[in-house]
Image: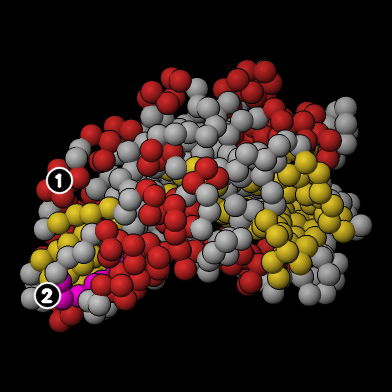
Amino acid sequence: MPQTPRTGARDECGVFAVYARGEDIAKLCFYGLYALQHRGQESAGIAVSDGASILVSKDMGLVSQVFNEPRLATMQGHLGIGHVRYSTTGASTWDNAQPAFKVTPAGRGLALAHNGNLVNTAAVARDLGPGGQRCSTDSELLATLLAGHTADVCVEDALVGVCRAVRGAFSLVVMDEQTVYGARDPHGVRPLVVGRLPRGGYVLASETSALDIVGAHLVRDVEPGELVTVDERGLRSRRFAQATPSGCLFEYVYVARPDHRFAETTVYAARRRMGAMLAAEAPVDADLVIPVPDSGTAAAGGYAEASGIPYAEGLVKNRYVGRTFISPSPSLRELGIRLKLNPLRDVLEGRRLVVVDDSIVRGSTSRQLVAMLRSSGAAEVHLRITSPPVRNPCFYGIDMATRAELLAAGLTIGQIRDFVGADSLAYLSLDALVATTRRPKSTLCRACFDGQYPIPVPGEQAAAGKDVLVRPRAGSTDRPPAGVQA
């Protein structure tokens, strides 16, 4: 299946899980995934159980494209998990959509959904033998490993063993026929929260926005190195590793929705502070501050307020553009950013602009943006970025290119400015960005900015700047296997 080029950072996926009696579980999963759609747009899937068997339904596309009323009506039960995916390992095919489903040696079912990336998949796959070598994603590898572990112990103990055996970033939701589990790696790179439904029952989700949409109130984060279990007895916790927190700093900059609530701050408030600090670190004489929607919107408001420069919406975003599989004709090759953003000429013409965006990864989008603003009559374009230069690839679940493709890995800020065509370019300093999170620097993963990886990465992958550690399965197709609804 053809894909559009990846021009910016992408997060791998979002996960959701629920255990509740007397609720429409499939619809709760649907709406939870709908709130997490920004974390992945390639595929969507839901697994539910009525206590006796698990039904998995998944397909390529957005949540609203994969599921409809008739399809959800066939999915009855009192527990379920869901997943939205943007691939960072494995090809974009039906085979790699989640939840992954496996049958244990005892004949029971297991479904697993995963946010993050493992860094020792090659070693784990070798240890598993032919079954491991056939896995096309680290998520499938996790499910295969977990199913094998249940030959000797219960699912909960098996999951503890798996979490101790793998290395990297993982926020997992897992289910068998009667129980939901959630786990976070010891560094807590990817978020995972617990919520409680008003009529009883618990929800696990990548972001608090998914709790809000189903009416659950936030209980707490799943702690790094913690396994939570939800069944008819309620919620219980078990620690499988000591916590060494290294939460992803890029979640604050770009990945998470503005309404996501960390313990210390909301993403929206952090982004407002990013803009205010940018105004202090990189002032400029200009007529208007405009955001690159949506991740630059809150920061642009903060910049405008701190600088005293008026705020305006100079770019209109097409809300219905996600991924497109329609290749442009030769005459439309330069569509580029205009698919998603359209300039307001009467706002921009003759104005000196401060343009606030979240990051520059490969630089092609920023270059097109600046050219578009100039063609719309902007007198000056001053680009302000709410993160430091991205100089290093991510190995923990964000598709942030290889080192060779990262613009800032080989260019100075002045050279980047010249490449994108801006009158000036400034990035927020790392210390200022960290301060906006209200968290200690030591508890954040900053590797894409400073190269300090909290989880050791195999040297050959780190040197090559590659994050695809599992080969796509040869001959994979878009056809669902027998027994799984498509």
Applied colour scheme: secondary structure
Q: Where is residue 263 in the image (x, y as percent from the top left)?
A: 61, 60
Q: Residue 289 lies in magenta, yes or no?
A: yes
In this rendering, would 5 be left or right of 425?
Answer: right
Residue occupying the point 47% across, 49% down = 249
Residue beneath the point at 87% across and 59% down: 234
Residue type indicated by callout 1: Gly
Q: Position of residue 320 (x, y in %)?
A: 40, 69
- Three-letter amino acid code of the residue under disc 2: Arg
What's drawn in magenta, residue-wise? 286-293
Left or right side of 48 for 305: left
Q: Nearer the viewer, residue 418 or 118?
A: 418
Question: Gap between marks 1 and 2, in whole Å?
Answer: 23 Å
**Residue 91 placement, left or right of 137:** left
Image coords of residue 303 (percent x, y):
30, 69
Location of residue 433 (image quadrant): bottom left
Percent from the top left, x then y, of residue 386?
34, 57
Q: Name the residue under label 1.
A: 414
Which comes before the other along the chain, label 1 or label 2?
2
**Residue farthest to the right, as pictured:** 233
* Residue lying at 53% horizontally and 53% vertically, measured from the top left: 439
Question: Is residue 70 in view?
Answer: no
Q: In this view, does 87 lie above or below 71?
A: above
Q: Please check the rendered image and state whether residue 132 is part of the magenta-colored stretch, yes or no.
A: no
> Is disc 1 placed on a helix, strand or loop?
helix
* Closer to us: 460 or 42: 460
